[in-house]
Image (cartoon, grey):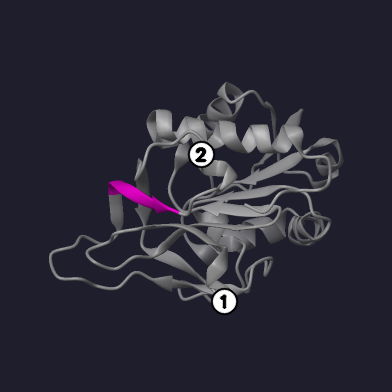
Amino acid sequence: MKILLLDSGVANLHSAAKALQWGGAVVEISDRYQDFAQARAIVLPGVGAFDAGMAALAAKDLIYPLQDWAAAGKPLLGICLGLQLLFERSAEGEKEGLGILNGEVRRLPSIPGVPLPHMGWNRLQISPGGVLWQGLPPRPWVYFVHSYYVDPLDKSIVTATTDYGGFHPPVAVGQGNIMGLQFHPEKSGPIGLQILQNFVQYVAVARGDYAQI
């Protein structure tokens, strides 16, 4: 089973590839939409600014193929900036996002005594029953680096939040075949590896009738 790790040019791919391979996937790193046809799922990682991420996808002619992939009901996982790019727009920039998920990306609030960006280890408050959370302890620790958070129009797609100085931003979403993580599972130790293994197992057993995250 092949998972395509999308090389948009704005991501460190090595750690994500190793983590997915540990979870049992055959990983292909590619920046070509022509390689989508051979994949069972796509992982869209990313770091940096929203506009730069969208510009990188546009330069590689990946925007419409990603939208078509998502519309066809095939598994797509966005990580960090990759999650944010799934939405319609961002307060960080001016370019339109992929629009696969309805909503926008907002800047984390300035809270006295709380560092911005939100960087380091923090705990998840997860929604029970999500396939990505199978086998995790209550309120697991994961690793964050971000200054912006996603704000879905449909709040029911939020599958995890965290506590940022009393503010609880969404940090994971799931809508059918589309899912995303604001934190870095590939940097989150055994917890992150378990999350990615859960994704690989989800893809492996899916046959087009994809379960709701």
| 79 versus 14 height, above or below | below
Front residue of 73/68: it is 73
- Give the left or right position of residue 61, taking residue 162 as reference: right
* Residue shown at 67% from the left, 54% from the top: 212
Residue 194 in the image: state x and y as whole percent: 50, 31
Q: Is residue 36 above or below residue 200?
A: below
Q: Which residue is mark 2?
A: 12
Q: Which mark is residue 82?
A: none
Main secondary structure along the magenta-highlighted residues: strand
> Toward which corner of the image does residue 191 lie, by quadrant?
top left
Q: Amino acid at mark 1?
A: Leu
- Is 71 situated left or right of 99 in this image? right
Residues in magenta, as a range: 120-126
Residue that mark 1 sits on:
153
Q: How many marks?
A: 2
Please name the amino acid that badge 2 sits on.
Asn
At a point 83% along the width and 46% down the height, the residue shown is 208
Q: Quadrant of residue 152?
A: bottom right
| Position of residue 151 in the picture relative to residue 137 (left or right) | right
C-beta proximity under 8 Å, tags 2 and 1: no
- Quarter occupied by the N terminus: top right
Q: Position of residue 102 (x, y in %)?
A: 63, 73
Please report the residue visible at 43 percent of the width from the left and 73 percent of the height from the top: 106
Is 161 one of the magenta-colored residues? no
Question: Residue 54's spot in the image, x, y percent?
Answer: 62, 62
